[in-house]
Image (cartoon, grey):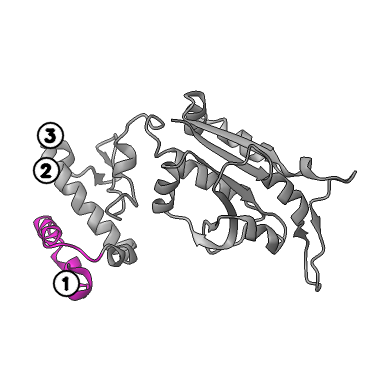
Amino acid sequence: MTLRVSVITIFPQMIEQYLASSVMGRATKRELLEVTVLDLRSFTDDPHRSIDDAPYGGGPGMLMMAEPMLRALSDPRVVAPVIGLSPIGKTFDQVDARALSSLAGFTLVCGRYEGFDARIEERCDRLLSIGDFVLAGGELAALVVIEATARLLEGVLGNETSAKDESFADDLLLEYPQYTRPREIDGAAVPEVLLSGDHGEVDRWRYAQRLVRTIQHRPDLIERRGGISEKEVEILHRYGYDELLHSFDKERFER
């Protein structure tokens, strides 16, 4: 099945150039991903192709006008649901990416300047943000959403297990550390377990490392998943992470 995505933007080349390369380019060639870019300026009706104007009530900057965007949203190439990219939206995460990857398609609306006329927001099915910071426009956010979503489609990645083992997978654990040649550099050696040939032990060690990384760097994810299980505590004990376990509130992190 092909995931069909439409993007409404005033900078179509930004979207098209990026998606023509690397993994997204291969996904398009394999007909797993189809992205239609709608140039918002083509929906204007004045000689200057205006898409912004001063806000009522005053204030700094310019605001994206409602009429060109509403015309664009009426275009038959727009695929439901319509998602507005805005800092006031829900923060996009892997759960959202997985949900979007199960759809037949969706449309992303890229803002610019001081944002949308509020009547544009009302026409969107939902609003998404990629973080609590401000960008010049929604194009980078659109690319983030498209790539995070499309790479979950079967056949997009060369190794189908890659997406399952990465950070923010179903178990909300970060990815384990990985190593390649040389075996030692500046005194830092590859862990012996990875050279043992014991695949079961490698898998257990990697799972322990995922737990360690998440506890150290993203304890909020540990709380979101409801803590760590007795079996996971045993795995951490197995690899000598008792001090790490003791540094946290047992009731907070065990389940």
Q: Residue furthest right?
A: 47
How far across and how far down the image is residue 244, in percent? 20, 66
Give yes or no for contact between labels 3 and 1 (Cβ–Cβ under 8 Å): no
Indicate the quadrant containing the N terminus: top left, top right, bottom left or bottom right.
top left
Indicate the quadrant containing the C terminus: top left, top right, bottom left or bottom right.
bottom left
Residue at image position (24%, 37%) is: 183
Earlier sequence position, callout 2 versus callout 1 = 2
Q: Residues within 10 Å of mark 1 (few under 14, many from 20)?
A: few
Q: Amino acid at mark 3?
A: Gly
Residue at image position (51%, 42%) is: 146
Q: Amino acid at mark 2?
A: Glu
Q: Which residue is mark 1?
A: 246
- CA distance for labels 2 and 3: 9 Å
Q: Amino acid at mark 1?
A: His
Q: What range of the chain is rendered magenta?
A: 226-254
Q: Residues within 10 Å of mark 2 (few under 14, many from 20)?
A: few
How far across and how far down the image is residue 46, in percent? 88, 46
Task: State the mark number for residue 129.
Answer: none
Count how many numbered circles sit on residues in the image. Answer: 3
In the picture provided, is 211 more to the left or to the right than 139? left
Residue at image position (17%, 68%) is: 254
Q: Which residue is mark 2?
A: 201
| Secondary structure predominantly adopted by residues drawn in magenta | helix
In the rendered image, the vertical position of residue 166 relative to residue 112, given as above or below: above
